Every structure is written in structure tokens, then in C-alpha cells.
Image (cartoon, grey):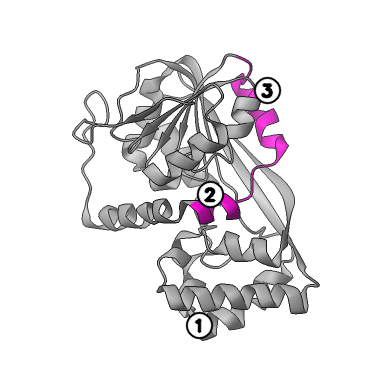
Amino acid sequence: MAPVYFADASQTAGPGHTWEVDSSFDLHCQRRALFSGSASVYDAGRPGYPAEVFELLATQCGLEAGSRVVEIGPGTGQATGPLLDAGANVVAVELGAEMATLLEENHGSRHLTIVVGAFEDVDLPAQGFDIVASATAFHWVDPAVGLIRSADLLRPGGSLALWWNYFGDPHRSDPFHDAIQPLLQSHAPQLIDCTSGGAPGSGAHPYALDVDARVDEIGRTGRFGAVRYEAVSWTGRHSASEIHRMFGSFSPWLALESTVRGKLLDALANLVEQDFGGTVRRPYLTPIYTAQRI
């Protein structure tokens, strides 16, 4: 069983860095907390990551047996499992207790320590890690705090690795994306404007693909060397029930009134059965940013 610790929320974000939240980020924090109440939906609905991501972690970040990794926002373990498969010793910092419970059930028999709390607040050893990793989660962390905190946790020469599953690809056709537009317009038009590209309302927002902004954020810290960016292209394949669970795990959908959300998810599943022969194939990207601590 993995040891599970609960953070003291009164702690500061790290030496000299107190996390101050303005009203807009407070709303952001409310949205990120939605996942915890739907942990089982998230666990069933979210796909994992292509193997190429972990190959890049090995070649660019030195991921290997015995690597000390802190993972920010592991959810229920979609990336944690492959990190453990590589032989890493993982400290997983998960905001939601319900998510942490499923993470422990999924991977707790391995070299995993789970810390429940916000990454900005938890107590972790300075220069105690070889890799700071975050998979489809770092946009929930205040970057002014998160990047400095990550540098503080890394040993000199250790690596930052941030990646996201982007549920779409601006350079490939996506018939399912096109087909769901009328449904969204009828039932929840606010979801259409939630994102630019990718699945509407999925969280596949341009943050992950805004390369200049992400590289600039990391560079402005003065704590990392050159940032390397790569985007892994792959194809997702989903049954009607998988589409229902996956879309039901996206934060803008979790924020919908439950009756509206249920009807819309059922409509998506029916669309898969009736118009796509029971299986949807969608173009996806996994952009990954890596940099070494100097």
C-alpha cells in the first residue's frame, strides 16, 4: 500500500514564495476542484499517454530505474503507471482526496508515495528529485509559483517535463468534432467558446499548444536551460460508452447542470452509435516541454 500524506494548507509555496490568489484564479481553483467529486468518472474516462512520451522522458530527462520523480496532479494514475513501469520512485501530489484514493487503489502496491494537497502548498524536499513531471495538469497550477517551485525541488541538472493530451489536432480532419457542433449549439452553446480547437469544452484549450508562451514562461524563471518542445501525434479510438465517460470527465462539462450534462452525454453516445458505427477515431496530440534545471 502506498503511503498517503495530507498537506498542511497553511504552508507557503516554498522558500520566499507565498501563493496569493486573486479572484480570477480563485474561480480557476474552484473549477479544478470539480474533478475530485467525479474521480470514478475521470478514472474510467481519461485515456493514457502514447509510449513516445515516456521514451522522450528517458532520452531527454534520464527517466530510468531509481529515478526520483515528483508528479504534479496525477489524477488516478494515467501517467503514474508508466512512470512506475520505468522503475521510478514517484511522489504524486494530488489535490483531491477522492482522486488520491483511486490512485492508491490503482498503483499503491508499487514505489509510490501520495501526498494529498495543492502543489503550491505541500512540503517536499528541496533538490530532492531528478524529474518534476506533470501530465495534463500544470495549467491548473499558478505558473508564477509552480515553475519556481519545480526548480527548487529539482537537483542541479534535473529535468522539468510538462505534457498534455490535446483532444484534437489543428492539422488533421476531425469529423466527430464537426458532428457534435449542432448538439452543443442546442444544449450547451457556452461549451463551443470554451476552447480553440480540439474537443469543444474538453479542456483542449490552446494553452498546451501555445509554444511561445510556454517556452517564455519557463525561460523567464532564469532557473532552466533551453526548453525542448515536441508534439506526439496519435489517434484515439473510442466506443460510445468511452466517449460518454471521457467527455463526462472534462471540467467544463462537470460544471454543467447535471440534467443538461446527462442529456448531452447521452446524445454524444447515440451519435457515435448511429453515425460512426459504434467507434470514433479522433486525431490527438500530446505536446511535451522539457528543460533542465541550471
Q: Amino acid at mark 1?
A: His
List the residue tagged with mark 3. 59
Q: Is residue 4 above or below residue 68?
A: below
89 in the magenta segment: no
Q: Name the outermost residue toward the bottom.
A: 186
Splitting the image into 4 quarters, where does residue 220 fall?
top left
Q: How many marks?
A: 3
Asked which secondary structure carries label 1, the reply is: helix
Residue 109 appears left or right of 114: right
The percent position of residue 52, horizontal first and vertical second, equals 71, 36
| Amino acid beneath label 3 | Thr
Residue topped by disc 1: 187
Residue sitting at 40 percent across and 55 percent down? Answer: 37
The residue depicted at 56 percent of the width and 63 percent of the height is: 247
Residue 198 x %, y %: 60, 62
Residue 96 seen: no
- When asked about the image quadrant of residue 114, the answer is top left
Tell me the number on the disc at residue 84.
none
Q: Is residue 174 above or below residue 155?
A: below
Query: Vertically, is 103 above or below 271?
Result: above
Residue 86 on image: x %, y %: 65, 23
Question: Which region shows up in magenta?
Answer: 40-65
Tag of residue 208: 2
Q: Is residue 229 toward the left or the right of residue 140 in the image?
A: right
Q: Which numbered disc, 2 or 3, marks the residue that appears first in the sequence?
A: 3
Prevalent SS, magenta region: helix
Tag 1 and tag 3, C-beta contact below 8 Å: no
Do the residues bearing badges 2 and 3 touch, measured as CB atoms within 8 Å?
Answer: no
Q: Is residue 120 visible?
A: yes
Residue found 65% across the figure and 59% down from its top: 168
Please name the amino acid that badge 2 sits on.
Answer: Ala
